[in-house]
Image (spheres, rainbow, N blue to C red):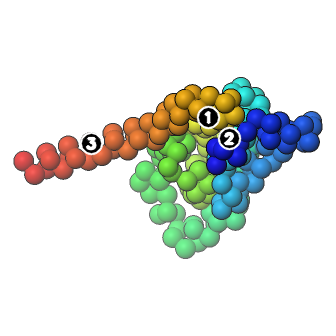
Amino acid sequence: MLEQLDGDRISGWIEAAGIWGPLLIVGLMTAAIVATPIPSAPIALAAGAAYGHTLGTAYIVAGAGLGALIAFGLARYLGRDVLVRWFGEKVDKGWLGSQNALTFTVFVSRLLPFISFDIVSYAAGLSRLHFWRFGLATLAGIVPASFVLAHFGEEAVSGSSSRAAWAAIGLGALTLIPLLIVGLRDWRDNRLRHE
């Protein structure tokens, strides 16, 4: 895939889109979040390649945030009543009824690239989470990942394969560190239970 991202090709696309380029990026990112099967990472990489770190990140965040809010709203207005009708008010018992726990869960899920952004948005819409809390947690959580993807996209077209390799290693580390923390915690808890 990286071989297909050369600077001349991206520049050609952006020049062809003209002033509509940023709107195209935002629209594609929004569609990728609302329509789950569409992958968003290639769009984010292209945004970084075309617009650099800062503007690329801004366009990615705008599109992903808008898509998340639409998915949340769709689930809230089309599915929440059905859940309450099937399960009654007990659907929100325990931590599912805690605004703080739900907000924290959305925030952390946005930081972990292996958790489906789309599914979290729809699932949060089915919960009691307040719209403003969802928006704030989503915004705070997507900025770091958006910057990394924009950076990786820019590095991929910069012609420096070593810088692109370091960006890929950094992205991999961001994914691996939370998994290691959870794995070590579970291993420690399991070991303590058996002693």
Closer to the chain start, of discs 3 and 1, is 1
How busy is the neighbourhood of tag 1: few (under 14 within 10 Å), some, or many (20 plus)? many
Residue sitting nearer the eye, 117 or 158: 158
Specify whether residue 39 is in view.
yes
Left/right placement of residue 22 relative to residue 46 reads right
Residue bearing mark 1: 152
Q: Quadrant of residue 77?
A: bottom right
Residue type highlighted by circle 2: Leu
State left or right for residue 22 relative to residue 40. right
Rendered view: 124 above or below 170:
below
CB atoms of marks 3 and 1 within 8 Å: no
In three-dimensional space, the C-alpha distance between marks 3 and 2, rounded to whole angstroms, equals 32 Å
Q: Residue at x 71, y 54 (%)?
A: 32
Residue drawn at 69 percent across, 58 percent down: 38
- Tags 1 and 2 in contact by the CB under 8 Å rule? yes
Quick one: SS at disc 1?
Answer: helix
Find residue 192 and report its horizontal and vertical position in percent: 13, 45
Q: Report the residue at 33% width, 39% height from top.
A: 181
Q: Position of residue 64 (x, y in %)?
A: 69, 44
Residue farthest to the bottom? 86
The label on residue 184 is 3
SS class, disc 3: helix
Looking at the rendered structure, the secondary structure element under dot 2 is helix
Q: Amino acid at mark 3?
A: Leu
Q: Any mark on residue 130, and which?
A: none
Number of the label disc, if any, that sits on residue 45: 2
